[in-house]
Every structure is written in C-alpha cells, then in structure tokens.
Amino acid sequence: MAPTADELLAGLPETFRYSEAIAQINERQLRRLIGDGSIIALTRGLYRKSDWLGDEDLIEIAAKAPRATLCLLSALARHDLIDDIPAEIDIAIPRGAWTPDTTAPVRWRHFAPDTFDLGRSRLGIEGGQSIGLYTAERSIIDAFRMRHIDGADLAHEALKRWLRQGGQPSELLALAQYFPRTQSALREALEILL
C-alpha cells in the first residue's frame, strides 16, 4: 500500500531543498505532493509544507545568499527602533559578492568586506534556518553612515529610541570606531541627546 501524504510529509522539514526531499522520498511522490497542494514551491528548488506559517521571503533570501544580513530599515524595525514597516527588505552582502535574483522585494546593499561581520548576529527563522541580522548598535551606525539615502531624521529617531530602551553610548562608540566617517555625526547627536 502506498504511503499517505501525511506519512510522506512527516519525514520532511518545514522548508527544504529538492535534494533534501529526494533523500527522503522519490520524485514521483514529491510531484504528487506538489500536485495535491501539500507542498508549495517557494522558488526554484526550494519548497515548504503548505501548512507552514513562516517568513517565506527571509527563507528564500537565506537560501540564495548565505551571508545575507538584515540591515538598515529592516534591522531597525526588527529592533523596534523605528515605526516604519519597510516596503522592501534591506539586505547587506559583502561588496563583490554575487547578488541573486529573488521574488522577495529586496533592496540589496553592498558593505565593505572588512567591516561586514562587525555587529552581525544570527536571527533564527522557521524551518531550522537562520539569516544574518545586524545588532541595534550596528544598525544605528549604518543609519548614520547612510543618512544621505534614508535621511538624518531616521538615524536620530533610531538613536533616541535606542537610548530610551537603555542603550549604552559607550558600546555604540566602541563599535563606531571602525567607521571613522560616522563618528563625528554620532558624537554630535549623542551630545545633543544626553
């Protein structure tokens, strides 16, 4: 007797690649699960179970760019430092790295490789995967660095909120030393706010 859809799905993770599925079930069974709607294709070669509720955009980005890191508006929103809900996901990758095509609305940012990992942590996303996320301090520094694009008001508002949440200026300034062009603007803003 052929295994049921539930039995086939039981051996698969919430999100998975084609190769991971074929290691558990055969291609005919996979096509049957896709055909009956039990499995949904996120992008070419990347699938999820239909009852899974997670952030498909982040899963796709993490699968296509392993060093992808939430930055700028997206990171500030994750840290609750701004009220905006960004229309696009700001993703940093090291300068010179390949920029993949995604169905997710991504604004790719290319950061210097020598400072790329400073203030970078991992954010767990559903399906046992993770994506990079800059810390609140790094996100504020980046907002000051990129204030010519997103506006100085955004950087100042994020800094104010971070300070209200108990942020320590010494930690911020310690990280800012690696971004010399940002230090003076950041120090001036801290002097006004403190």
Image: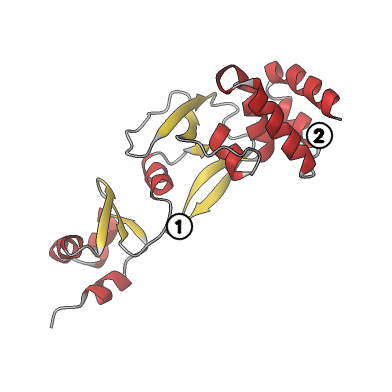
Residue at the far bottom: name it: 1
Total tally of numbered discs in the picture: 2
Image quadrant where residue 52 sits: bottom left
Q: Secondary structure at mark 2?
A: helix
Give the class, few, some or many, for how many residues have Cα within 10 Å of label 1's Cα (few <14, many ≥20).
some
Horizontal side, residue 147 vs residue 52: left or right: right
Tell me which label, 2 or 1, sits earlier in the chain.
1
Left of 38 or right of it: where is 58? Answer: right
Image quadrant where residue 23 sits: bottom left
Q: Does residue 86 appear left or right of residue 118 in this picture?
A: left
Direction from residue 110 to residue 176 in the image, left or right: right
Position in image of residue 126 (x %, y %): 45, 57
As rendered, which of 118 and 183 lies closer to the eye?
A: 183
Q: Quadrant of the N terminus?
A: bottom left
**Which secondary structure lies at badge 1?**
loop
Q: Does residue 119 lie above or below 111 as drawn?
A: below
Q: Is residue 181 above or below residue 69?
A: above
Residue type at the position of mark 2:
Pro
Disc on res. 178: none
Query: Is residue 71 among what the camera can see?
Result: no
- Looking at the rendering, which quadrant does residue 157 occupy? top right
Question: Type of residue at label 1?
Answer: Glu
Give the spatial CA distance, label 2 vs label 1: 33 Å
Q: Position of residue 33 (x, y in %)?
A: 20, 65
Q: Residue at x 47, y 38 (%)?
A: 67
Residue occupying the point 78% across, 36% down: 171
Q: Which label belongs to residue 169? A: 2
Residue under the image location 62 percent in, 27 percent down: 142
Image position, residue 175 (x, y; %): 72, 31
Residue where numbered disc 1 is placed:
126
